[in-house]
Image (spheres, rainbow, N blue to C red):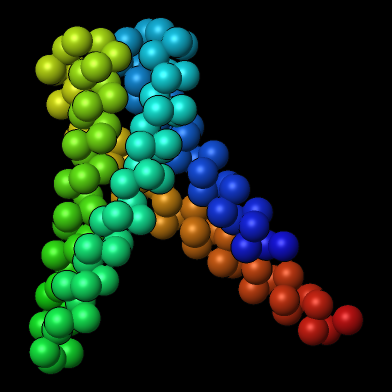
Amino acid sequence: MVAAAKKTSQVVTHMTIAFAIAYAMTGSVVFGGLAIVIEPVINVLLLPLHEKAWAAVRARAATKGDRYMKIAAEKLSQTIMHMGVAFAVMYLATGSLAFGGMAAVLEPICNVLLLPVHDRFWDNLEMRLNGKASLA
């Protein structure tokens, strides 16, 4: 139950970040709404393809160190893909390279800073709930 609530909360947090950035840059609820719908949908469609390609790359890792380097490269590639989607959505919505560039930088940074705090909150909640359940 907690895992489902955590995933739902992650989606809502991600969408809130996308909306806040789009709204802050454009002052438009419509553009903010487009950002929270279009950007996650594109990422959801692209991510399985990205993961499948990188699973093949990781499978060819010769050593443990090589595997870690491939995982790091995968995360960097995922970040670049995410930035490209954020840029494309904002650029296509506004026609502004500046707004596209700002979204490409700000959106992933906000996610990197806020989502670990979010996850820590949910992990602590789950531990407290499991602790209370085991005491009962």
In the displayed orientation, state which residue is furthest to the right.
136
Q: Is residue 6 left or right of residue 52?
A: right
**Residue 109 appearing in the image:** no
Residue in the image at 29% along x and 64% along y: 52
Residue 50 at what x, y percent from top left? 26, 56
Decide which of 98, 24 is in the foreground and name it. 98
The N terminus - image quarter: bottom right
**Residue 7 appearing in the image:** yes
Q: Is residue 25 left or right of residue 67?
A: right
Residue in the image at 58% along x and 60% along y: 122
Residue in the image at 26% along x and 71% along y: 55
Figure quadrant of residue 73: bottom left
Figure quadrant of residue 135: bottom right
Residue 121 at what x, y percent from top left? 55, 58
Q: Is residue 15 left or right of residue 50?
A: right
| On screen, residue 131 above or below 126 | below
| On screen, residue 73 above or below 68 | above
The C terminus - image quarter: bottom right
Residue 102 at what x, y percent from top left? 19, 26
Decide which of 39, 60 is in the foreground and name it. 60
Decide which of 82, 19 is in the foreground and name it. 82
Residue 94 at what x, y percent from top left? 25, 10
